[in-house]
Amino acid sequence: MSYLTIPLDSKLDRKNFSCGKDLLDNYFRKQATQDVKRKLSVCFVLIDRESSSIAGYYTLASNSVSNSLIPDSFRKKLPRSYSSIPTILLGRFAIDKNFQEKGMGKVLLIDALRRCFNTSDSIGAFAVIADPLDKEAESFYEKYGFIKLPDSGKMFIPMKTIKALFE
C-alpha cells in the first residue's frame, strides 16, 4: 500500500471517517476546515493512494508552554528570562478504524514530527506538545518518547529528541 500526506482539502470526503472517538470524528467532519480557514491550525491528512480513503489526520498550531512546566532537566538549559517557551501543538491526531493496528499511527506521527522539526528551523520551537485525549493516546505518545508535563495532562518531546530520531 502507498500513502500520501497532504494538507486538508475541503473537497475530501470526510463523512465516513471514524476513529471511534466522537470528539475527534466530529472535529474532523465539522470544524477542521473552518479552523484552517481562520488560521487557527493546519490539518494534514494521510490518504491511501489506492482507494483515496482517509487513513488519518493531525493538526498543528503554534503554541507556548509555561517555563515552570518544563521538567528541571530541560529547564536548566533554557534562559531564565523566558516565562513561556515556544512550542508546536500537535492538537488532534486520529487514525480511521479501517487503518488502525496497521502502523498508520507511527507513519502519521513521524510525518508530523518531521514537519514540526523542519518548521523549527524557520520559526523557533523548543518542543512539540501533545494533549492526549485519554490513557490510550498517552501510552501511544510515551512509546515515541513524549514526556509528561507536570500538573497539565500534556506531554512534550524536545526538538533535540526529534532530531535524533531522523539521524
Image: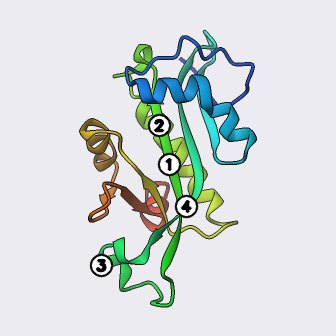
Which residue, given by chain and number where applicable, does mark 4 sit on?
Answer: 63
Q: Give the amino acid type for the residue marked by disc 1 in the picture.
A: Leu
Circle nearer the N terminus (3, 2): 3
Instruction: Tell me which label, 1 or 3, sits earlier in the chain.
Output: 3
The residue shown at (32%, 60%) is 152
Sequence-first disc among 4 and 3:
4
Rendered view: 16 above or below 89: above
Label 3: few (<14), some (14–19) or many (≥20) C-alpha neighbours in 10 Å: few
Task: Give the image quarter of residue 58.
Answer: top right
Inspect this view and state whether residue 71 appears: yes
Cα separation, mark 2 vs mark 1, equals: 7 Å
Side (left or right) of 95 relative to 40: left
Task: Point out the tag, 4 or 2, that comes first from the N-terminus.
Answer: 4
Secondary structure under tag 3 reads helix
Tag 2 and tag 1, C-beta contact below 8 Å: yes
Residue 157, percent from left and from top: 40, 60
Amino acid tagged 3: Ser
Residue under pointer 3: 73
Q: Position of residue 57 (x, y in %)?
A: 54, 31
